[in-house]
Image (tube, rainbow, N blue to C red):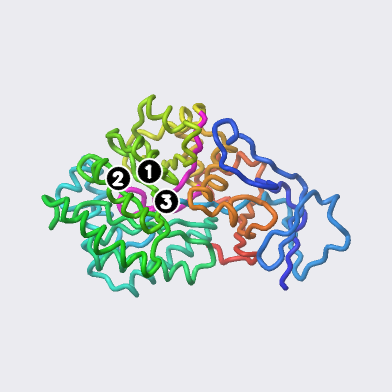
């Protein structure tokens, strides 16, 4: 049995006896214990409290002096596209030159560009590059991650991506969830045969995915020029037959009814939400839907789009999560520290709201709420130690600085940059 005692924590952040999805006003409530200790046994949190209440009999193999650091749960990044074959900085230059996201996609760029490169890359090469990226994210404080397919757009390519994600799950030190996103774009071969591609997803991909247990969720990019509401419903209903709940891309560019349909499909989360009407915000705040609004501010930042209306969503009582959307085209960074800062700076979220959205609610958006997301007895000791700070608000305030001193995963420190 390996035991760790962390002493002299300036403030232990997000301490909870039990956790539920945080909505509206609840996102402001961030319980902390000043001058605290944390006790870990075999990678699991066993006790915590104020230093003055530290039991004398509590001994440990490793005693760590936090030396006044803030300690908080690792980030839970519930929306990423970590597995890809190559970066797309040439499109970055196209954007600077004035081309829109849609225009780049129309000339064979965007998702189709990534799909062509991925299909030409071996599974081993994809795994090695993804594993390297994963460890870079862990060093930045990510302690749980969702990874989507969607750059294969063929039976072979999608299965290859999902098998890579399965290997990452088996070898990673953090919890990983896998999402099947073949409905990311229509490949050129099926540009005028949507029915044919949807049949390929339903008849040729899903049965193999179920047999090999390659996915936890199903996703669809519901957007003008991509998948219609009706097409999204068909893919999700087919996925449901194999136990895959939806986590959906909706309302990134246009409002076409994806939110109402996603709620009816009992989606775990509805992601992006840059474009929202007042009626849609009302739907998202309905107590009959227990899902989350996952906001991806770094995608809006990179594409120079309007930011998601986080303030209106929270004030309406919605459950908001934050994620990186790490991908080579529209958010080539998985740095959740910047996501949290950007959420405060551009979406007017309070530091407490942003931290909760990137930890507790992020865990719920992956069905990992019993493993990570808060300092709670029985959860994994996946935690961040900050550098010396004047207050917790300094973490999102100092957006250009790396305020992470150390990262602990399963009770052991990992290599940081």
Image coordinates of residue 312 in percent, x first then y, are 46, 27
Q: Earlier in the sequence, mark 2 or mark 1?
A: 2
- Give how far across and how far down residue 349 sits, in percent: 52, 34
Q: Residue at x 22, y 47 (%)?
A: 94
Label 1, secondary structure: give it: loop
Circles 2 and 1: CB distance less than 8 Å? yes
Nearest to N terminus: mark 3 or mark 1:
3
Q: Secondary structure at mark 3?
A: loop
Q: Quadrant of the N terminus?
A: bottom right
**Residue depicted at x 16% and y 47%:** 106
Out of 115 and 224, give the one closest to the viewer. 224
Give me the residue at 71% from left, 62% from top.
40
Q: Which residue is mark 1?
A: 265
The residue closer to the viewer here, 367 or 381, is 367
321 drawn magenta: yes
Can you tell which mark lies on residue 233?
Answer: 2
| In the image: residue 138, left or right of residue 274 | right
Judge the density around disc 2: few (<14), some (14-19), many (≥20) Cα neighbours within 10 Å: many
Which contiguous range is marked in magenta?
317-337
Residue located at (37% from left, 37% from top): 273
Q: Nearer the viewer, mark 3 or mark 2?
A: 2
Mark 3–mark 2 contact, CB under 8 Å?
A: no
In the picture of the structure, the residue carrying the numbered disc 3 is 79
Q: CA distance from mark 3 to mark 2?
A: 20 Å
Which element type, helix, strand or loop, lies under badge 2? helix
Residue 246 image point, x, y percent: 39, 49
Q: Earlier in the sequence, mark 3 or mark 2?
A: 3
- Residue 412 in the image, given as x and y percentages of width and height: 64, 67
Dividing the picture into quadrants, the one containing residue 43 is bottom right
């Amino acid at each position: 049995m390996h035991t760790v005692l962390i002493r002299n924590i300036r403030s232990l952040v997000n301490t909870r006896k039990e956790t539920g999805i945080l909505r509206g006003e609840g996102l402001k409530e961030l319980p902390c214990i000043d001058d605290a200790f944390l006790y870990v046994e075999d990678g699991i949190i066993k006790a915590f409290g104020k230093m003055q209440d530290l039991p004398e009999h509590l001994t440990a193999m490793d005693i760590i002096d936090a030396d006044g650091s803030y300690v908080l749960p690792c980030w839970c990044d519930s929306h990423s596209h970590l597995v890809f074959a190559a970066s797309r900085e040439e499109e970055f230059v196209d954007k600077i030159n004035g081309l829109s996201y849609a225009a780049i996609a129309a000339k064979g760029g965007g998702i189709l560009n990534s799909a062509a490169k991925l299909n030409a890359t071996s599974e081993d090469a994809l795994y090695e590059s993804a594993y390297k990226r994963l460890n870079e994210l862990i060093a930045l404080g990510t302690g749980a991650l969702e990874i989507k397919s969607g750059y294969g757009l063929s039976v072979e390519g999608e299965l290859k991506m999902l098998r890579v994600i399965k290997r990452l799950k088996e070898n990673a030190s953090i919890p990983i969830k896998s999402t099947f996103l073949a409905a990311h774009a229509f490949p050129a071969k099926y540009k005028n045969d949507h029915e044919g591609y949807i049949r390929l997803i339903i008849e040729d991909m899903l049965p193999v995915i179920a047999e090999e247990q390659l996915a936890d969720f199903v996703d669809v990019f519901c957007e003008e020029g991509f998948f219609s509401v009706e097409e999204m419903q068909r893919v999700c209903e087919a996925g449901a037959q194999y136990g895959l709940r939806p986590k959906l891309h909706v309302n990134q560019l246009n409002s076409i009814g994806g939110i109402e349909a996603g709620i009816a499909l009992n989606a775990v989360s509805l992601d992006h939400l840059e474009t929202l009407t007042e009626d849609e915000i009302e739907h998202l705040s309905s107590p009959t839907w227990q899902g989350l609004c996952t906001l991806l501010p770094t995608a809006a930042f990179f594409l120079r789009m309007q930011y998601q209306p986080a303030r209106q969503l929270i004030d309406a009582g919605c459950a908001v999560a934050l994620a990186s959307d790490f991908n080579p085209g529209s958010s080539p960074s998985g740095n959740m520290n910047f996501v949290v800062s950007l959420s405060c700076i551009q979406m007017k979220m309070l530091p407490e709201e942003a931290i909760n959205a990137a930890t507790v609610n992020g865990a719920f958006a992956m069905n990992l709420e019993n493993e990570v997301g808060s300092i709670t007895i029985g959860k994994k000791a996946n935690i961040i130690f900050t550098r010396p700070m004047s207050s917790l608000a300094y973490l999102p305030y100092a957006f250009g600085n790396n305020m992470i001193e150390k990262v602990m995963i399963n009770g052991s420190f990992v290599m940081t940059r």
